[in-house]
Image (tube, grey):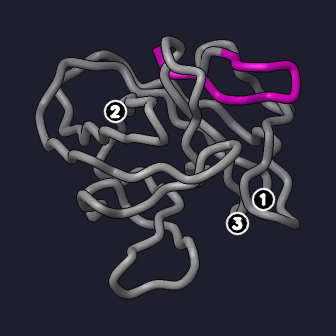
Amino acid sequence: NASALTRAGAVSLLDLHEGCELVPGRSGHEAVVRSVCRHELCERRVVILRFQCVETEWSLTVTPDHALMVLRQACQRTFRPTLASEVQSGDRVRTQSSEAIVTQVEHGILDTEVTEIQLTDVHGSFFAGDESSSTFVEVCG
């Protein structure tokens, strides 16, 4: 189950609603939930991203068109919105307290529900993760 980081801690995406204030990722941009859309269980293409930060390893499963804030070591100096389908091993992502390295990218098909979060600020971002992990990755809303 995916969750988002609020000032009060991690909250399941299923419990988010319009007006919820999330911890913002991008400086100068709020992360207030404009809408939550739940898509029914069906077979979907997914990208499973595996990360490492210091000695912690974790993963996040997203749809291919979900954007994350990514730094490409070879050709970028700043983090930029990048589709999950374009993320590569060796890329860096921002966490709530530092950076993590993408160690593995798997493309697959799963029977899964999807929760789509849109923010009031289209340039805003927030931190999402798996409830079993205490580390969250900056994603675009």
Q: Residue at x 82, y 43 (%)?
A: 32
On the image, numbered disc 1 is attached to which residue? 121
Task: Tell me, yes or no, whether the two marked residues, 1 and 2, touch with CB atoms within 8 Å.
Answer: no
Disc ID at residue 123: 3
**SS for dot 2:** strand
Q: Is residue 72 left or right of residue 9?
A: left
Q: Residue at x 46, y 14 (%)?
A: 1
For marks 3 and 1, give the CA distance: 5 Å
How many numbered discs sit on the rendered protein?
3
Q: Which residues are magenta?
A: 1-11
Task: Tell me, yes or no, whether the two marked residues, 3 and 1, touch with CB atoms within 8 Å.
Answer: yes
Say above or below: 76 vs 59: below
For marks 1 and 2, give the CA distance: 24 Å
Say above or below: 12 vs 37: above
Q: Main secondary structure of the magenta part?
A: strand
Where residue 106 sits, quadrant-wise, is top left
The spot of residue 93 in percent (x, y) is: 49, 55
Q: Is residue 14 magenta?
A: no
Closest to the camera, between mark 1 and mark 2, is: 2
Label 1 sits on what residue type?
Asp
Label 2 sits on what residue type?
Thr
The spot of residue 62 in percent (x, y) is: 36, 38
The spot of residue 66 in percent (x, y) is: 42, 50
On the image, numbered disc 2 is attached to which residue? 61
